[in-house]
Image (tube, rainbow, N blue to C red):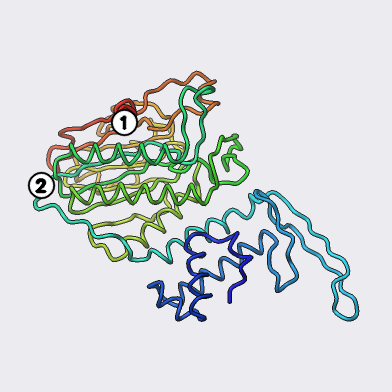
Amino acid sequence: MIDEGLRQFATETQSKYMDAINKHGSLQKAANATGVSRASVKQAMARLRKAAAVRGYSPEHDMTHIAPDGFGIKRHSKNYDGNGQLRQEWVIMQPDAKNLELMQESILAGMSAEIEGGSTPVKAPVSTYENMMTVYPMGDPHIGMYCWAAESGNDFDSEIATTQLTDAMRRLVAVSPPSKYALIANLGDFFHSDTLDNQTRRSGHALDVDTRMSKVWELGMKALITCIDEAKSKHELVTIRNEIGNHDDHTSMLLSIALDAWYKNDERVHVDRSPAKFYYLKFGKCLIGTTHGDTAKIPKLPGIMAADQPENWGKTLHRYWYTGHFHSSKVEEYPGVLVEQFRTLAAKDAWTAGAGYRAGRDMRCIVLNSEFGEVERHRVDIQQIEAAA
């Protein structure tokens, strides 16, 4: 039997495994009942116990003092008498930011264990244009950000963010031609926060954060799966690239790991898992580069592409950089390459609104011909999405 006290630390998947173990009496029977391997159930329970111990709960080790949300156990000391009875106990707690990576591993790895190879089949399009690719740049979705309309002009939270993102994707897929290839370019800052102390990891910038992080991560992953499946309905082969943003250094990489597990048996989807800050994709005479935009300024990007991709640079005529980070639209042309910076669908938070930023909110798709480069593009504005809602 699994200790019922662990349930308060369990993800939805781990809770389901707990029920199966308690009902059927063994790991193997629980695995059979839930349709996963015994190893998946065993590993999920090990991660659950580890996550609970970080918060101070491990009854088999006389640990029952649970740290509140946002805190973890820094040090746990005990004093026993000669008979082995506990006489005194000292529990030192600290903010839980240092244990965030463990929580991320527990939540997303647990999701990966359940979803490995579990993608839902999507019927492939009957026919597609082999010489065309549609690129869907996602500029800084910031899922997990909280905004209050009275303060910043618009209400915004995780539910709103994921609903608007998937709605925009559906609209863009609907108007895209049935190109054989699609690239979903998440340009970074898909998640608003990477730490429990509600600050950006590198600069310490304070963040307005919505709801529990485990819920934010799950909503974000499900939203991106919806976007990928929408693309699969129109395009034969779909590539997904998650850039590392300054808000989601770790969760961006963990998101790719989880998505790769979900689409493990799907030959129509490729999830790029490279941790590099710059990504390149050659399509006929087109060369695409993507990056978040926080580590290299726009004028440096053409030279970086030429240095990183000398062979593909020489074989292509149409070269494009797609970036995010600044939440505003900008296009700069340099010899041999166009650099484009994309807007976000996300609302302004309190700091951005107070600083006077007023860029528009939209999402676009760009259609490339393997011979002629960009041949068309489509745009959906936030006002269209809000009016329909």
Q: Is residue 168 above or below residue 5?
A: above
Q: Residue 301 is drawn in which quadrant?
A: top left
Looking at the image, residue 114 sits to the left or right of residue 238; the answer is right
For the N terminus, the quadrant is: bottom right
Q: Front-most of 10 and 348?
A: 10
- Residue at 28 percent across and 59 percent down: it is 120
Mark 2 = which residue? 129
Callout 1: few (<14), some (14-19), or many (20+) C-alpha neighbours within 10 Å?
A: some
- Whether residue 332 is visible to the viewer of this picture, yes or no, is no
Q: Is residue 386 above or below residue 209?
A: above
Q: Give the label, 1 or 2, closer to the camera.
A: 1
- Whether residue 257 is visible to the viewer of this picture, yes or no, is yes
Q: Earlier in the sequence, mark 1 or mark 2?
A: 2
In the orientation shown, which residue stands out farthest toward the top?
Answer: 356
- Residue at 30 percent across and 46 percent down: it is 227
Q: Front-most of 351 and 114?
A: 114
For the C terminus, the quadrant is: top left
Give the SS element for disc 2: strand
Callout 2: few (<14), some (14-19), or many (20+) C-alpha neighbours within 10 Å?
A: some
What's under tag 1, amino acid-wise?
Answer: Ile
Tag shown at residue 324: none
Tag shown at residue 385: 1
Image spot of residue 321 (x, y percent): 31, 37
Label 1, label 2: how many angstroms apart (C-alpha)? 29 Å
